Amino acid sequence: MLSSILSKQSCASCKFCCSFRRQSLWETQLFPPEVVEKLSHPNEYGVMGEFRDCQIVLGGYRTDDTEEEVPCTFLNPHKGCILKAEDKPFDCSIWPLRIMDKDGELVIALTPTCPLSAQRPGAS
């Protein structure tokens, strides 16, 4: 279904969903506790994450610019996300769809913050 909205190649070249500004750190993904345990120690990916309350902690900001973006620890700039499907947070697995609260009901929506989904024909 998502392939009719976005191609894998387009997503791989964008990586917008895998980088965060300081002001949007509250949006970093939540990992299940068992995945946090796995990724917090030497693992098959060769990258260890730092977590707080099951949320990944990002470092690496070089300036005080609030618009500076830092990539997720598990983003390889050439290959994309290095995590296997079973280790990806739910939000990452369904992006650019998001579960949102609309008037007290949970709905699934195409996020307006995805640059590529916003450019598709018919998007407003």
Image (cartoon, helix red, strand yellow):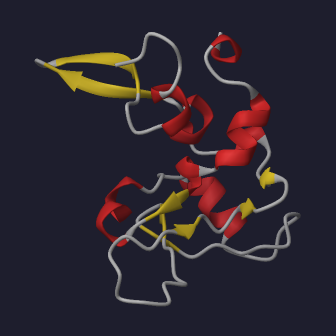
Pinpoint residue 80: horizontal percent, then vertical percent.
Answer: 77, 52
**Which residue is painted at 61% across and 16% down in the image?**
5
For residue 6, which quarter of the picture? top right
For residue 12, which quarter of the picture? top right
Residue nearer the viewer, 89 or 122: 122
Q: Report the side of 91 relative to 37 (left or right).
A: left
Above-or-below relation of 117 to 57:
above
**Which residue is painted at 76% across and 62% down in the image?**
77
For residue 101, which quarter of the picture? top left
Furthest toward the left, the residue is 103
- Position of the C terminus, as image quadrant, is top left
Total numbered labels placed on residues in the image: 0
Q: Report the side of 104 relative to 120 (left or right).
A: left
Above-or-below relation of 14 to 37:
above
Pinpoint residue 10: horizontal percent, then vertical percent.
Answer: 71, 35
Pinpoint residue 46: horizontal percent, then vertical percent.
Answer: 85, 72
**Which residue is painted at 35% across and 88% down in the image?**
64
- Position of the N terminus, as image quadrant, is top right
Above-or-below relation of 106 to 122:
below
Above-or-below relation of 37 to 124:
below
**Which residue is painted at 56% across and 33% down in the image?**
116
Pinpoint residue 53: horizontal percent, then vertical percent.
Answer: 40, 65
Residue nearer the viewer, 100 or 23: 23
